[in-house]
Amino acid sequence: MNLATLMPNIHWIPVIVMTIVSFALGAAWHQKFLFGKTWTNENKPTLDRKMNIPLIFGGTAVVHFLTLAGLNGLVAGTGWHNGLHVGLFVSVIFILPALTATYLFANRSLRLLAIDTGMYVLLFAMAGAVFGVW
């Protein structure tokens, strides 16, 4: 498959919807009743620095949109079951190892890695299932 055959398969409305859902999932995921307290404690040195909020949220929206568009191009219309499996495959085979290498070099905790990658595994599984039927 090349880019010329992938691009026409992308359904943009579901990509936009799932990009918005990714922010809702992230907001819920990082609440104190789920993983927020642990996530904050594990990130304490980073959170003490001044943060560029527009850059963080804008950059996150762009990269989520791009990755979800890619997933959509792969699974659009293939059925929820196939979409779910491809979403899981992409998150476990690509995202988990990439984040793991980054976290190892940054000397970040495995607990933090589990929280952050867990959200992406869930997001990509959900998005794959939705894209498979939409």
Image: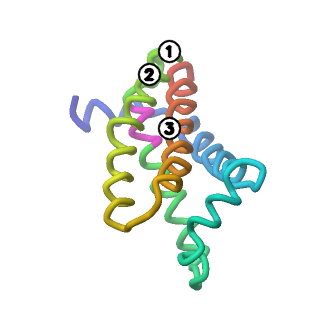
**Residue type at mark 3?**
Val
| Residue 128 spot, x, y in % from top left | 50, 28
Residue at the far bottom: name it.
Answer: 50
Do labels 1 and 2 touch, CB within 8 Å? yes
Q: Which of marks 3 and 1 is nearer the N terminus?
A: 1
In reply to whether residue 46 is colored magenta, the answer given is no
Q: In which quarter of the image is the N terminus?
A: top left
| Image vertical order of residue 130 relative to residue 23, above or below | above
Q: Which x, y percent locates residue 14?
A: 57, 35
Residue matched to label 3: 121
Q: In which quarter of the image is the C terminus?
A: top right
Q: Which amino acid does label 2 sit on?
A: His
Question: 31 above or below 14?
Answer: below
Q: Which residue occupies 50% across, 36% down?
A: 124
Query: Is label 2 in contact with label 3 (beta carbons under 8 Å)?
Result: no
Q: Is mark 2 on a helix, strand or loop?
A: helix
Q: Identity of the amino acid at label 1?
A: His
Q: Which dot marks residue 5?
A: none
Label 2 belongs to which residue?
A: 85
The residue lying at 44 percent from left, 41 percent from top is 69
Q: Quarter of the image holding residue 122?
A: top right
Q: How far apart are marks 2 and 3 (CA)?
A: 11 Å
Is tag 2's residue or tag 3's residue first in the polypeptide sequence?
A: 2
Q: Residue 81 carries which label?
A: 1
Residue closer to the observer: 28 or 41: 41
- The range drawn in magenta is 68-73
